[in-house]
Amino acid sequence: MSWLWYVYIIECVDGFYYVGRTWRPDERWTQHLSGLGGKFTAKHKPKRLAYLEEYDDFEEAALREKQLKGWTRVKKERLIKGEWGKWE
């Protein structure tokens, strides 16, 4: 059985963005909200799950996560607003 993988962007209350990857987005979101999702979101407090992409392949999801983490704030905001294509 293969898992679906998800790459996501969380908008934090102080305006920062967090990019992550998981195979259980609902559970991971709950972890971030409770402060157990990682040091970054424990410090910056999640506001909303701003963006989510689905992948059939772990490696593809990992590459996309790395790509998004390297993007500027402006590019992330354009992606969230739907103004930037998935593979641009």
Image (cartoon, helix red, strand yellow):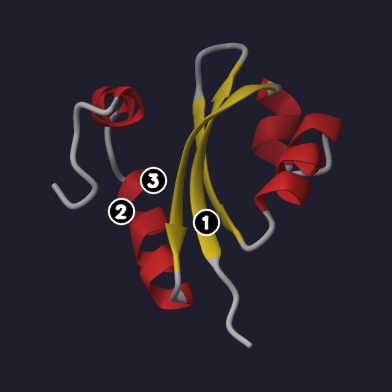
Q: What residue type is labelled 2?
A: Gln
At horizontal 20% and vertical 26% (from top left) the residue drawn is 83
| Residue with the mark numbered 1 | 6
Between 79 and 44, the residue placed more toward the observer is 79
Q: Please tell me which residue lies in front, 37 or 54.
A: 54
Kindly state the secondary structure of the residue where label 2 is placed. helix
Residue 8 vertical placement versus 61 (above, below): above
Q: Which residue is drawn at 41% across and 76% down?
A: 59
* Residue type (three-letter) at the residue carrying disc 3: Lys
Q: Which residue is painted at 13% across and 47% down in the image?
A: 88
Left or right, residue 43 beside residue 11:
right
The residue tagged 2 is 67
Q: Position of residue 70 (x, y in %)?
A: 31, 45
Residue 69, which numbered label?
3
Q: Do the residues labelled 3 and 2 touch (CB within 8 Å)?
A: yes
User: Marks 1 and 2, Cα distance to the nearest angstrom?
Assistant: 14 Å
75 w.r.t. 26: above or below: above
Give the residue furthest to the bottom: 1
Left or right, residue 52 beside residue 43: left
Q: Nearer the viewer, mark 1 or mark 2?
A: 1
Split into 4 quadrants, where in the image is the N terminus? bottom right
Q: Position of residue 27 (x, y in %)?
A: 78, 49
Outermost residue to the left: 88
